Image (cartoon, rainbow, N blue to C red):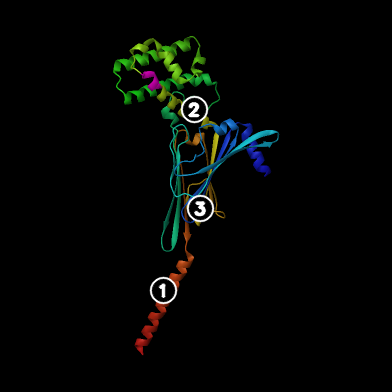
Amino acid sequence: MILKIAFIATFFLIGCVENLVNISILKDGSYLVKYTSIGNKPDLLDIDFKHPESDSNHQWITTLESKTINNEIIWEKETILSSPTRKKLVFSNSSSLQYDIEISKKSSIFWTNYYFQSNIKNLEIDKKYPEINQYLNIDQDELQWMIPVKKYIFSKSVERYQSQNNLNSLTIERIDSQVNSYISYVKEKKLEKEFSKKTSQIFLDALLPIKSRLPENFFNDMSIIIDELEKEFEKNTSLMSDNFSFSIMLPGKIKDQNADTINNETNMVYWEFDFNDIATNPFNMYAHSVVINNLRAQLVFVILMLLFIRLLWKRKQNKK
């Protein structure tokens, strides 16, 4: 208990969130999932790593409580699947960590195979934000990388809008030119604080001089796209302070896995990852266990022995 308290206190003091996901695979092939997140209350309630919520397929039970340790308030959020499921869990909201959990069972006469697989989607930091990638792993003033962030969101939003609507090349050039002029003006006048505002508002400010030349409802449509990209970016940067641990308990004997740690006595396998592990690459987990049906094997052995004895007895009778 003392070690657990020290562990929790450490993460609280450095402002991180520790996310624990425990999966128990049952012999019938169904499984239960339990989420536990530990940290500051605001961090537990943000959307970068959302605990599952109830829907038509699954019912989840969530609790949030505080604990006082060494005069510090530690919050713990826990979410439990109310009943076992056999369905694949897929979390695809781009505003949160994207991943899936899949369990499968394959039975034969003598043994049953259990398979676990989970894929954490690559955040693609290097592809999405090539201009700001250099800033993400160092402690710098937020304003130093805010401009390239907004610039990326502007260009990507226009690109998405263009794929859904017809914008002529002249209009696109005007938008790019006006955005670049606005950015140059902000840099020249050292008004970087302007870029701490909501991105859709900055985009409107930048394009006000050419507003009359833009399509009707352009800003309303663009605001939806911009807000979505901004949430995705906020998710990616918020994940920089999160740590994740997956633990899986499988029936039978573990035959194959790519886990960080394995406990053969309890049939538990463990993975740990953080922002650096998923920033530019996916993080994939898998494990395979086997349950041998000893009763069936023994029964078949007895039957074969009886057949063999009978065959010998018949040969002996034929010789007489």
Q: Which residue is mark 3?
A: 250
The magenta span reads 217-222
Q: Position of residue 294 (x, y in %)?
A: 48, 65
Q: Which residue is mark 1?
A: 304
Q: Are marks 3 and 2 in contact (CB under 8 Å)?
A: no
Residue drawn where x is 35% and y is 23% of the image: 161
* Amino acid, disc 1: Leu
Label 1 – label 2 distance at C-alpha:
66 Å
Q: Could you tell me if residue 7 is visible in this image?
A: yes
Is residue 219 part of the magenta span, yes or no?
A: yes
* Amino acid, disc 3: Leu
Magenta part mainly helix, strand or loop?
A: helix
Answer with mark 3 or mark 2, whichever residue precedes in sequence. Answer: 2
Q: Position of residue 209 (x, y in %)?
A: 39, 10
**Disc 3 crowd, CA 10 A, few/some/many (<14, 14-19, 20+):** many
In the picture as drawn, the residue positioned furthest to the front comes out as 56
* Amino acid, disc 2: Glu
Q: Which residue is mark 2?
A: 234
Q: Closest to the observer: 96 or 246?
A: 96
Q: Quarter of the image holding residue 109?
A: bottom left
Answer with mark 1 or mark 2, whichever residue precedes in sequence. Answer: 2
**Disc 2 crowd, CA 10 A, few/some/many (<14, 14-19, 20+):** some
